[in-house]
Image: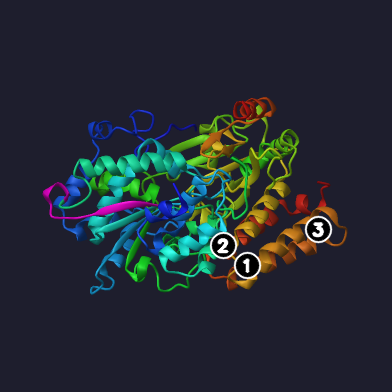
């Protein structure tokens, strides 16, 4: 679907803005919202591009820069930290050869931190796009990354 | 004395298929709604008020009272709304996720009852964007409830109309605050509104709005069906009913546990299998980042909104993050302070600047020389000023973990090599 076609699925009302931004980002293989998409959204809703930009910049889940095909969100909550999430983050940085916030050279993964993912019963946790992975340790992380790399 | 769980809100969890409305109905589902549709709206509100149901999102305000205010405000307003706060993001909290993923019809039924009580014909369920399973299960529940006649026009022939749809968050803790949520729901940046006016007077799109938490609404069908006297058999006089606690950290069986209000912290920890590796309890962070640290002197305190408040602690969302001997309180406090820095929206200067300063000062507590006790006192004092000069609960929160950590663990925070 083109940007215009995605946006047209929504009634031209501002309360649909977050849903439009989610849809645009999800449809982009590089997991971000382009300048053109912001402009078309503003036109559709009859609001300024700057207010669309302001909303897109505010929310942590949205990106205005190209990212990897898969977004890894590691839970940075106190619970996960208590159960050694720092080691998990260090291991992911080592395995992926990136720092938190960066995208791998092959464009596969972007490594990010997230607020509490609400998976504290099996911490530490992370999400890769829509999927949750719990009880993380060295072996589990290698296994999960392998399943994505194929 | 050890205790067992008392599952009334979570009674269907693990026993029914959340994607099959028939399962929910066979377990007695939607009977509360049927009864509510026979009642006068004001009687629904009275029943919830007399049952003593209090908001489970953290504030513990009377649900019936909130509904009364919303139903009575602005009689000439053309529309009234119900908004379900499903933006669960308080660290260590996952009670709403469990309900949404595993028994979505229960809170949906509660939502329809609440709408009937305040005579709203339109509702929104605001779910955080990361909760994909909750979104999926709720979407299916809504579709099936429409097909079964529990939503839409003339619900079960009662003449009452109610429509509901899901709205998505996109990664902002602050949007869990009710007025900020309404901004986000309208498609704006999550900056808090000045209150008053409260949502009951001027909520979403400027109309009277009832904002209730998922767990709160999940209690409503049970109260309506079984009555206030049945409900009051559980819990205490001022905190009736049960609470879903989420116990995490250094316990053998972390998870969600539903118990009557009034059990002790020790009993909760025992319920979650006790401390890992046979270690001793050191501390718990109650209520998440916007919560309070307690030490072993609080283990026998009863877990109710009022008792904990009197003892300078919070019950909040029901998060219980358990720390064992050897776990550094400093690291967890620092984590909370970094979290507030990240989530501050920047609208109020004291919060924007203050949350950053507190992290820098916490760094100094670890690294620097100088008078650390004076520094810690200064941090508590600054968080007090932030609390007094910030619009919303975010700027008012850092004082909670900071002051309580200083109260119980000042020596450790000021002297140990981290």
Chain hosting mark 2: B
Instruction: Answer with left or right where residue B254 lies relative to residue A23.
Output: right
Residue to which mark 1 is pinned? B351
Q: Which chain is disc 3 placed on?
A: B
Q: Which residue is mark 3?
A: B364
- Residue B410 place in picture, x, y as percent: 74, 54
Q: Residue at x 67, y 40 (%)?
A: A82
> What range of the chain is rendered magenta?
B155-167
The answer to whether tags 1 and 3 share a subunit is yes
Residue found at the very far right of the displayed protein: B369
Question: Label 2 belongs to which residue?
Answer: B394
Give how far apart the Cα atoms at labels 2 and 1 are: 8 Å
The percent position of residue B153, horizontal first and vertical second, equals 17, 52
Q: Report which quarter residue B207 is drawn in.
A: bottom left
Measure the C-alpha gap from mark 3 to mark 2.
23 Å
Q: Are marks 2 and 1 in contact (CB under 8 Å)?
A: yes
Residue B107 appears in the figure: yes
């Amino acid at each position: 679907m083109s940007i215009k076609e995605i946006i047209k699925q929504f009634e031209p009302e501002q309360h649909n803005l977050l849903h439009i931004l989610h849809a645009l980002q999800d449809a982009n293989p590089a997991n971000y919202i382009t300048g053109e998409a912001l402009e078309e959204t503003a036109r559709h809703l009859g609001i300024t591009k700057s207010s669309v930009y302001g909303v897109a910049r505010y929310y942590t889940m949205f990106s205005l820069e190209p990212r990897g095909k898969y977004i890894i969100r590691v839970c940075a909550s106190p619970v996960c930290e208590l159960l050694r999430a720092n080691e998990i983050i260090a291991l992911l940085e080592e395995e992926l050869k990136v720092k938190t916030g960066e995208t791998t050279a092959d464009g596969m993964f972007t490594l990010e931190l997230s607020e509490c993912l609400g998976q504290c019963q099996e911490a530490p946790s992370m999400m890769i796009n829509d999927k949750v992975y719990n009880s993380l340790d060295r072996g589990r992380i290698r296994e999960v990354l392998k399943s994505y790399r194929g | 004395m050890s205790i067992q769980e008392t599952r009334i809100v979570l009674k269907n969890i693990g026993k029914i298929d959340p994607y099959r409305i028939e399962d929910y109905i066979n377990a007695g589902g939607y009977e509360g709604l049927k009864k509510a549709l026979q009642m006068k709206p004001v009687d629904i509100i009275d029943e919830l008020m007399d049952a003593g149901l209090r908001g489970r999102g953290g504030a513990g305000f009377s649900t019936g009272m909130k509904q009364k205010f919303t139903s009575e405000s602005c009689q000439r307003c053309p529309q009234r709304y119900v908004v379900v706060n499903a933006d669960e993001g308080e660290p260590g909290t996952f009670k709403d996720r469990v309900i949404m993923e595993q028994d979505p019809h229960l809170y949906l039924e509660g939502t329809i009852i609440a709408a009937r009580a305040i005579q709203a014909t339109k509702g929104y369920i605001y779910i955080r964007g990361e909760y994909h399973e909750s979104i999926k299960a709720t979407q299916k529940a809504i579709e099936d409830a429409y097909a079964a006649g529990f939503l839409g026009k003339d619900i079960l022939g009662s003449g009452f109309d109610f429509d509901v749809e899901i709205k998505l968050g996109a990664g902002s803790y602050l949007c869990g605050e009710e007025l900020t949520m309404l901004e986000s729901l309208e498609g704006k940046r999550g900056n808090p509104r000045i209150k008053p006016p409260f949502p009951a007077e001027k909520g979403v799109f400027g109309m009277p709005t009832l904002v209730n938490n998922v767990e709160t609404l999940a209690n409503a069908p049970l109260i309506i069906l079984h009555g206030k006297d049945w409900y009051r058999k559980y819990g205490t006089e001022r905190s009736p009913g049960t609470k879903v606690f989420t116990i995490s950290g250094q316990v053998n069986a972390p998870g969600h546990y539903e118990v009557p209000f009034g059990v002790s912290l020790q009993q909760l920890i025992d319920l979650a299998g006790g401390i890992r590796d046979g270690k001793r309890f050191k501390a718990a962070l109650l209520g998440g980042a916007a919560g309070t640290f307690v030490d072993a002197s609080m283990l026998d305190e009863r877990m109710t909104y009022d008792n904990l408040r009197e003892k300078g602690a919070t019950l909040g969302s029901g998060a219980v993050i358990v720390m064992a001997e050897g776990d550094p309180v400093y690291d967890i406090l620092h984590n909370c302070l970094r979290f507030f820095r990240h989530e501050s929206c920047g609208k109020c200067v004291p919060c924007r600047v203050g949350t950053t300063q507190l992290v820098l000062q916490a760094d100094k507590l670890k690294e620097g020389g100088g008078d650390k006790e004076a520094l810690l006192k200064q941090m508590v004092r600054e968080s007090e000023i932030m609390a007094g000069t910030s619009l919303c609960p975010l700027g008012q929160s850092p004082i909670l973990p900071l002051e309580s950590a200083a109260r119980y663990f000042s020596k450790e925070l000021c002297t140990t090599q981290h």
